[in-house]
Image (tube, rainbow, N blue to C red):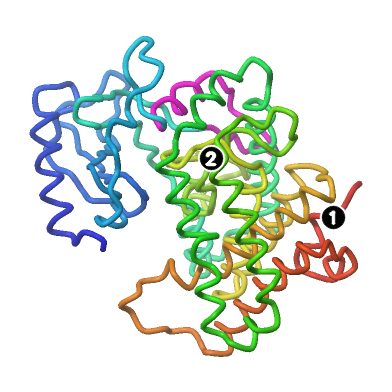
Amino acid sequence: MALNQTEKEAIGVEVTAELSKTTYACTSLTVLSGGTANFIFRGTLVMPLPDGSQSIIIKHLKEYVAANRNFKLDVSRSVCFSIPSTLDFEEMMLNVMDSFPAVITDNFSVRTPHLQYSNCNTNTHILEDLVGTMDMKTMLVTDTKYDVLTQPMCIAIGRALGHWLRGFHNWTSAPGQVDLRDYMSGNKAMREVRYGISYGAFIDVVRKFPEIWEENREVLERVKNMAAAEYANTNLQETEESWTIVHGDFWSGNVLTPDPTTFQNQQSEGGNVFVIDWELAQYGRKEYDLGQMIGDLYERKHFEGLGSALWILQAFVSGYGVLSDKMAFRTAIHAGVHLICWYIRRDPNAPFTEAPEQIQDAIRIGTDFIVKGWMRDLTWFEGSPLACLFKHG
């Protein structure tokens, strides 16, 4: 069960008191959406920082997941290398990502935000506030009003994201990052969260659609068993090309792009793109990041009719580069699971606004991605929305 707004604001009062004697003292906090494990606030500073910043982003961890108070967390997960100080998994990734340079593609620069302050005793982090940005999910919806996202711009954003993700996966796969991979394999709590809201849930959703379930149950159960073994395995798979450190929650809501309304006043396309919310970073398969973003963008196309989401999807795959057929099929499976789990990511107390046929079609399409991926049906995929996964040149 999620906390209500009043309860989140009460946590904000605690955080305000903690920061009151630091450089980051705030006059007010605003509760922000997002964050699976952490509570997120924007703080207005009493005094600007030396770089002129007047606001900050604050992430605070409790002994339970922010999205579900019934999912308990061991806050001792903050203990890590202890050089130079104790850091939690997200802090570790934000700090090491400072060594991974921004990736510039088609005038878009992609990087992670900078961590400015951490207190492992209170599990509080402060990050730079990336003003003038909007999460990509909101950007896609907002553009239906402003109509400034051209196809070339969407292609450029998608290519930049794909190029960045390939670079990130290659960087974390390098021999010199073996200690980091070993450390991140210890993020067991977030592996459980990620499994629980994907492979641990998708079969229960498909069962609500008996015709789809009965036709595909055998393959779906095999896929669940395969994924359960993957998520339970914390041993380094150093001989397997697909295994490395992954972002773990790579979807349009965790990518910040330039506010599309500012494009109206720009002479040239381009800008800064940021990959945020590293709390689910873990050791896993590259296909988890690829498939989640693909499934998410297809979800935007299916339910909201956003052709721009499909442009970004295809360019994202192109920017990532050529995949082996093995990786492509596994990515398609993950995309299908993510699409199906749209059903549980929505507000469970809110009525459906989508037509029953549209909902069933989403479950059918997601199931097809899974089943055809499991069966390695290349002919089917060549005529599908995911044909881009199998282009080798």
Q: Nearer the viewer, residue 279 or 237?
A: 237
Q: Which residue is drawn at 59% across and 87% down?
A: 210
- Image location (x, y in percent) of residue 310: 68, 63
Kind of residue at disc 1: Phe
Kind of residue at disc 2: His
| Res. 247 mark | 2
Q: Residue at x 8, y 34 (%)?
A: 17
What is the secondary structure assignment of the residue under circle 1? helix
> Looking at this rendering, what residue extends furthest in the top direction?
84
| Res. 174 mark | none
- Image location (x, y in percent) of residue 213: 62, 81
Q: In this view, does 317 lie above or below 374?
A: above
Q: Quadrant of residue 90?
A: top left
Q: Nearer the viewer, residue 197 or 349?
A: 197
Q: Nearer the viewer, residue 19 or 82?
A: 82
- Image location (x, y in percent) of residue 262: 48, 50
Residue 157 relative to residue 71: left or right:
right
